[in-house]
Amino acid sequence: MVAQEIESEAKFQNDYISQLQMALSKTQAGLKNNMKRLNRAMAQKGSNHVLHVILFGLACFSVVYLWSKHLRR
C-alpha cells in the first residue's frame, strides 16, 4: 500500500516535471523569437533615424538656400 502511494506520487511528480520542462522550452523559444524581432526593430529604427537626420539636413539646406536667393533680389 505504501509502495503504491510512493509510485503514484513519483509518477505524478514526473508528469509535473515534464509539463514544466515543456512550458520552459516553449517560453525559451518565444523569448528567442521576441529577441530576434526586437533586434530587427532596433536595427530598422536606427536606419530610420539616419534617414530622418539626412532629410532634416536637406530641408535646412533648402530653406537657407531659398532664403539667401530671396534676399539677393
Image (tube, rainbow, N blue to C red):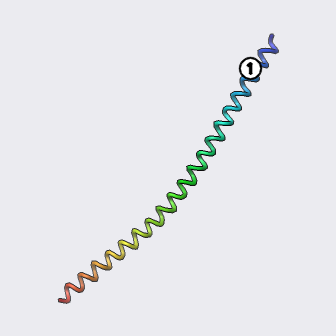
Q: Position of residue 68 (x, y in %)?
A: 24, 85
Given residues 33 and 50, the one toward you in this image is 33
* Quarter holding residue 6: top right
Please indicate whether residue 44 sits to the left or right of residue 73 in the image. Answer: right
**Type of the residue with mark 1:** Glu
Q: Position of residue 14 (x, y in %)?
A: 74, 28
Task: State the residue in front, 18 or 60.
Answer: 18
The residue wearing badge 1 is 9
SS under mark 1 = helix
Residue lying at 25% horizontally and 82% vertically, measured from the top left: 66
Is the residue 66 above or below the residue 3 in the image? below
Residue 44 horizontal side relative to residue 64, left or right: right
Rendering coords of residue 21 (x, y %): 69, 36
Which residue reaches farthest bottom? 72
Give the quadrant of the N terminus: top right
Q: Does residue 41 lie above or below 70 as drawn?
A: above
Q: Position of residue 35 (x, y in %)?
A: 57, 52
Q: Quadrant of residue 8?
A: top right
Q: Is residue 60 above or below residue 69?
A: above
